Image: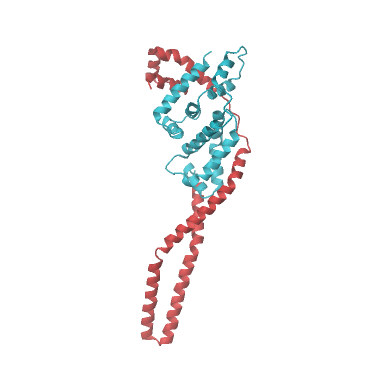
Amino acid sequence: MATDEDLMTAVASGDGRALAELCGRYERGLHRFIFRHTGGRDVDDLYQETWLRVVRAARRFDRRRRFSTWLFQIAVNLCRDWHRRPPPEPVDPASFEDSRAGPSGTADASLDARRLLAALPEPQRSVVILRYYHDLGEDEVAEIVGCPKGTVKSRLHHAMARLARLARQ
Amino acid sequence: MTECDDVLSQLLLGRALDADAAAHVSACPHCTAEQGRVRRVAALLASDDVPPVPPALSARVLRLAAPLLARQARRAAWWTLARALAAALVPLPLILFLDFHLVRTAYGVLNVLLPGAVSFYVAFNYAATLALLLALTYGMIPIVAERQMRLRREECRA
């Protein structure tokens, strides 16, 4: 079976079938990553833009690097840009805490998880999603988010502390 | 980062703790207090349910990428051809030099053995044949380059 990097070489020479193969391999993972990062907003647009950037930059892809790292790097950058865009994100930690403290307490668990993630600052959220949901190593996460491994660890630590505080009953 | 952070990170990621980590948790009051909360967070995160990818999404991506891919293909074809031509042009002066001397030597030898007009006719035909072969060889370069690119693409996909 062709490696992702081989397929990228083919994409760089304009091979649509290679791109389809890559899309098939990363469709689910990438879609889920973006969904969790943006809380389900503009997912399709960001997903689409990620792949278009992959195609546009295919010739500059360094075959010595892992394609998955590069792909998620593009997705993280797009999600960062998305978060910077106005209007600001409507979900804030306070609203999450209010909703948990509320009398109903019937919030759906999945929605709670989304709110938990939304309550994290963007850099911490990227690290938690990549580490927790995508099971990537700290080195790879560091490369994707573009920071040292120690920063990944500290972000994960701060995120965990924050999540634990938010999840407190 | 402390050992506590590493252990709690392992718990958050839902990993089984090894003997050392488990011993640390039971000995460390901070980790003992935190582990319940971390497990609750992990359980909450695990409950996140993401909807499936819309079936038409990848098709839309491929449709939108088609013009970009076509441009990449054209650029790659030109690039391959340029490289092939550049590589082929390197030995051309030597080939022309050798051919010229070959024809001239053949003409000299024939001139000794045959009448002048006949030697010229034979040498001219020989030179024309060499020129034709050279033209055919260089004319094949774009075809061979394109074929090579196609094969490489198929190899990448295989």
A20 sits left or right of B141 in the view: right
Task: Point out the residue furthest to the bottom here.
Answer: B115
Q: Residue at x 48, y 26 (%)?
A: A124
Look at the picture and state if B148 lies above or below A30. Answer: below
Which residue is at the front of the view, B112 or B2? B2
Q: Which chain did the image draw in red? A: B
Q: Is residue A1 above or below residue B53?
A: below
Q: Colour of chain A?
A: cyan
Where does residue A62 sit, x and y in percent of width and height? 44, 44
Describe residue A94's horizontal placement relative to residue B9 as left or right. Answer: right
Q: Residue at x 54, y 48 (%)?
A: A15
Q: Position of residue A66 (x, y in %)?
A: 45, 39
In this rendering, the answer to whether A26 lies above or below B122 is above
Q: Quadrant of residue A100?
A: top right
**Residue A43 sits in quarter:** top right
Q: Nearer the viewer, residue A67 or A49?
A: A49
What residue sits 59% from the left and 36% below the top?
A: A45
